[in-house]
Image: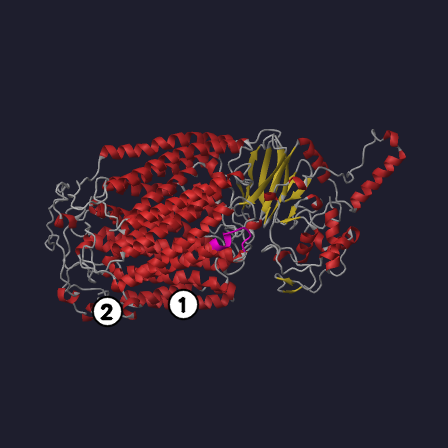
Amino acid sequence: MATTAAPAPAHAAAYATGEATGLWSWLATVDHKRIGTLYLWTALFFFLVGGIEAAIMRAQLMGPNGQVVSAEMFNQLFTMHGTTMVFLVIMPLSAAFFNYLIPLQIGARDVAFPRLNAFSYWVYLFGGLFMTVPIFFKVAPDGGWFGYAPLTTMQFSGGLNIDFWVLGLQILGVSSLAAAFNFITTIINMRAPGMSLMRMPIFTWMSFVVQFLLVLAFPAITVALFFLQFDRFFGTQFYEIAAGADPLLWQHLFWVFGHPEVYILILPAFGLASEILPTFSKKPLFGYNVMVYSGIMIGFLGFGVWAHHMFAVGMGATADTIFSMATMLIGIPTGVKIFNWIATMWGGQIRFTVAMKFAIALVALFTIGGISGVMHSSPPTDLQQTDTYFIVAHFHYVLFGGSIMGIMGGIYFYFPKMTGRYLSEKLGNLHFWLFFIGMNMTFFPMHYSGMLGMPRRIYTYDIGQGWENFNWWSTIGVIFQFAGALVFMYNFFKSRSSGEKAPNDAWGAGTLEWSIPSPPPDYNFAQLPVVTSRYPLWDLKHPEMTADLAHSGPDAMTITDSHAVPMHEETEYKTAKELGIPMPFPTIKPLFAALFMVMMVGGLVFVHAISMPFAIGAMIVSGSLFIGTLYGWLTSPLE
Amino acid sequence: MNRSPHRRLASAFVIAVAALALAACGAQKDLPNSTFLHNSEVNTDIIALWDRILFMGTLVFVFVEVLLIVTIFKFRAKPGAPMPKQIHGNHTLEIVWTLIPVLILIPIAVPTVKTIFKTQAPAPAGALQVEVYGHQWWWEFRYPELGVVTANELYLPAGKTVNFTLRTVDVIHSFWTPQLAGKRDLISNKTNHMWYTPDAKLTEGVFNGFCTEYCGASHANMRFRVYTTTPENFDSWVNAQKGAAAGSPVALAAQAAADSAARRTPQRAAVLPIPAPAPVASGYVFPAEKMPAHTVPRTPIPASIQFNDGLLAQGDAKRGHDLITNMANLGKAPCLTCHVIKGEQALVSDDVAKGPNLTHVGTRHTFAGGLFPTTPQNLARWIKNAPSMKPGAIMNVFGQGEYSPMMKANVTAGLSDAEIADIVAYLLSLK
């Protein structure tokens, strides 16, 4: 492991990569910061793709009987918009922060398994392309992001569309699971001396909860997808209605995954907001313990509410009641978080940076999504709301108003750490207001169109149904959002090279990642810090801020590790070689392992595209290459 | 930081929100598919529950957002201000705001549970039984006790409880009439139920219905109409609908038998049993002129389908009937391999028919999943090239020379426009 002090390094090459540039340095990187950066770029690219898909749909629905795209194309667009935004945008944007921040926040030099980390990223990239590219050939998945059987079985969807979806999700599941185990191991084993669990930064805590949600939720959809995959390719009958299948099997399995997935999408953004709000209020997070417990509570309860997506399927009054009550319970820990955030700002000195505005917007907008969530936790009212635009409004307030706002805040907040330069605040403000106004203009009217009878997932609607005004506003709002996205892109590219230079501690924050240079050296910490509180950097720089912090307790100032040195701010920039810190070798093997694995799984498409023997041949070839690459990977030294 | 541009943006946003609210109010007078109408007891229960949740939700919304706005204005950084007091938490406060959501949720939870059990209880005895079958992408409605099978248009007697039995023949659909009740899914290999009572005041109501579970290419085109009328009108409608198709051998035979019976013993007609099946009776049909604009479909017809509308006036129902039952160039009776026309030869039963029952198609105001008004022009184009009017429609392309997406070729053995005009005349005669 990179964190253990090692004797004189045997491999000089190990030092050569840290500051290297060029394509190779990115393809072969195993540095968690570079991988985090790759996740960020890739996910932002897919954000643009998903946004364009949404914009085309909104153009189609701007007025009644729209003629912009065909029904078939619209169905592919809404399927891919949902799939893209969930699996290729918000999850990987969160993963970008997991990668970049978790080791920095816990005072580690890398993640536990750097090469597995690279593998996760490449699997995500190739899997994402595998699902996205077919839309250019009009064979993109068209069964909805929820892929309800039996519509997705061969009987009703005979084309390649659903094949890409089933296999693509399986591929992305590998990426998510590998990353989740990696981060769980990292957080449990690699925290700096003195960093007890209850001293971890709140973002790392929320990430920790999310990794467990991933590990526990993904198997459910993996099983569901395997059934579907076997039905489609090998003639099993899990969802074949002619053979007497009960299609509710799919719905239960999907939502056992799908509901925790909602918290997988929102908790990282909660974590980012919980870092931003204290920093710009100059106050510690209010009720840290309760924030941790409520995050765990949300994650736990999230597994007991899946059937609230299914109130219309006729589960019976008893089941409806149980799932309704469980759903309402989630409102409690969520409400606590909202109040704690406000209490964090209360009495502070609030600086309205762009990051802070995004974080405040998260609190304001997520509240709206939470309230509409309670509205359909009640099954009788849900029967008038489910599968209408009211639901579309609800979850966009949660996922755009919550996740995206939090993540955007995180990007403005951590950009200086990643690049050493600030994003322009001026452009950032423009971006924020365009997003904030556009988002509300698009999604708020959907509450109305839904309650006035507009179903979801329709590519067209007739004249005079009472929905025209609302749909017109929704589409106009997209223009604002797109303008915001363009401003952000310009800001992002421009500020990388010519933004205002940022010091180590760009914002006066309190956690470890701000104690090292920006951008951080490849080894992160020249000396591993010793942590004695939740805001070690404030201890160091503003002892008056933390004077009343409970520094007593059993583990305060009792670090006896001989390697440990007291917390300090690192200002000198030395290479790993100068410091004698061994770094993992760069290696291209995870990239090829990911590529061959994606080819192996994706090769199943040939069953329907060409023939079974061809598919088996292709899979054997790519499978052999995959195993060969794995062998090479596992037998080559790490550092 | 210069604050004035932000203020301007903020006020622009407030104005936009206000404009939106006004737009919403402006639309109030015309809400053809609103879920907020007291048209059934179920909907009244739902609205009562909704009102309560909306009230609680508004309280929370106003409280949280006002608190948030006050906080960020009151505590914005002032130059030279001292370091704020460092507070890490407050157990009393945190217990209080854990309890606040509990106190808000209890008054929602209790009526929720009551309403769940009330609305999901078995339907009251004596309810009208209606079977709903979902098809990609149209609706089949059966009245098993009354012997009526129809499609896309549902007639209900006002004031009488209806018990729906919901099934699908293919993928999952969902049955929803927003103005009358919530929705319930139609799930493969499963039978669902729901019931409601259209209010007795709805003696001349028309309501739009929708499929609300994504079901493939034409999910958006799977619509239906619900007509509510007086029990007398409903009985009249049933009486006509259960008979055989006009002009069919069965109907003609029944008519002849009835006529001769009437000629032979006119004075004793009252005591003689009338032989079944009954002759074609003309019954109640919801008056087309009473349909509000939002219930009359205005789906555009693709310009790619050309049809010589001048031929429609020359269409002959008898010739059309002969074509339906015996098309020389298209095999025996291609229409009847997918559609049931009661009284004609039965090549398929209602249980396996791929298309809607057409026995009284001339009494329906809409067709093709409620997508088009039943006009000669629309029907002609539909017969000529259905898939181009409704994405994914499985009805064959019958127009000579038209492109068939299923055959991936142009139709060589098809119908001329004149033949289609005859068939249209026949279909419209099926009152």
Tell me which chain the residue with mark 1 is part of: A
Secondary structure at badge 2 equals loop
- Residue B112: where, in percent of width, then height? 44, 32
Q: From the viewer's perspective, tell me whether residue A254 is left or right of residue B142.
A: left
- Foreground residue among B281 and A281: A281
Camera-side mark, 2 or 1? 2
Mark 2 / mark 1, whichever is N-terminal: 2
Q: From the viewer's perspective, tell me whether residue B136 is left or right of residue A165.
A: right
What residue is shown with label 2? Answer: A20
- Is A60 one of the magenta-colored residues? yes
- Residue A91: where, in percent of width, then height? 35, 53
| Three-letter amino acid code of the residue under disc 1 | Ser
Tell me which chain the residue with mark 2 is part of: A
What residue is shown with label 1? Answer: A622
Q: From the viewer's perspective, tell me whether residue B15 is left or right of residue A424.
A: right
Circle 2 residues within 10 Å: few <14, some 14–19, many ≥20: few
Color theme of the render: secondary structure
Residue B359 tag number: none
Q: Would you place residue A80 above or below residue B67 in this image?
A: below
Tell me, yes or no, if residue A223 can be seen here. no
- Is A437 one of the magenta-colored residues? no
- Foreground residue among A93 and A31: A93
Q: Which residues are magenta?
A: A57-66
| Three-letter amino acid code of the residue under disc 2 | Ala
